[in-house]
Amino acid sequence: MSLIDNIDKDHLPRHIAIIMDGNGRWAKSRGKDRSYGHQEGVVSVRKIVEAAAAIGLKYVTVYTFSNENWNRPEAEVIALMELLVTAIHRETPDLMKNNVCLKAVGNLTRLPGKAYTTLMDCIRQTSANTGTTLVLALSYSSKWELTEATKRIAREVLEKKINPDDITETTVSNHLATNGIPDPDLLIRTGGEKRISNFLLWQMSYTEFYFADTYWPDFREEELYEAIVWYQQRERRFGKTSEQLN
């Protein structure tokens, strides 16, 4: 029996964020190059997005490439960028078929020209889709995001568009790269590590954290369903007591 039968479809997390860790270690354990792990990781993305669309998840954000990843060996970065282009081009028809809308957050201007153009083309093609929204966190880090948001707010203060005394948490949220995207209810990190690696620091103030030992290339539909079942057993209090909720 599939774990999907244990999921309460009326109480799904609205937004799941995923740190897709373990591609390189998965490949190494099989005597393969790291790029092989990244290629298999793309298959997991496809399977997870298809499963998300099938059960009605509204938002899935995947940590695709961090700002810090630019510091990896040049050959690996080039291979990842080429894989990005190939994957987006290949997956666009399936995104359309599954009514998935693609978005991206991050310092996208750092992307090579072909990767940027391919990404923007897919975002345009899927923009009218109304099912699951797949968000690629690409050339992204929270410290970069918060720094850029601070710069924008400071400029608006200088231009007298904002009074400093009127700045609220909502003001900050509205200036983030994720403006318009709800905060994650559930974070899934694969690969056995237990950290959030500069990912959605502001947005995950009340997110439930689920850490899986499974490497990302082996994380498929049943693993997603298991994480959702775990999430649905959590009591989310947001600072209140259990008695207040009941």
Image (cartoon, rainbow, N blue to C red):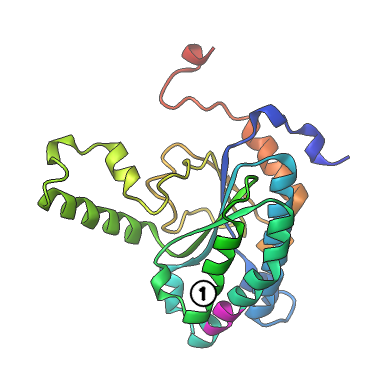
- Is residue 222 shown in magenta? no
Q: Which residues are magenta?
A: 78-82
> Which of the pair 171/140 is nearer the observer?
171
Residue occupying the far right of the picture: 1
- Residue assigned mark 1: 117
| Relative to 154, 126 lies left or right | right
Give the residue drawn at x 49%, y 12%. Answer: 243
| Relative to 183, 22 lies left or right | right
Give the residue drawn at x 64%, y 51%. Answer: 212
- Residue 51 x, y percent position in the rendering: 74, 49
Q: Where 84 sits versus 182, above or below?
A: below
> Which of the pair 110/36 is nearer the observer?
110
Residue occupying the far bottom of the picture: 75
Split into 4 quadrants, where in the image is the N terminus? top right
| Relative to 54, 118 lies left or right | left
Residue 93 visible here: yes
Amino acid bearing label 1: Thr
| Relative to 200, 230 lies left or right | right
- Residue 27 x, y percent position in the rendering: 69, 75
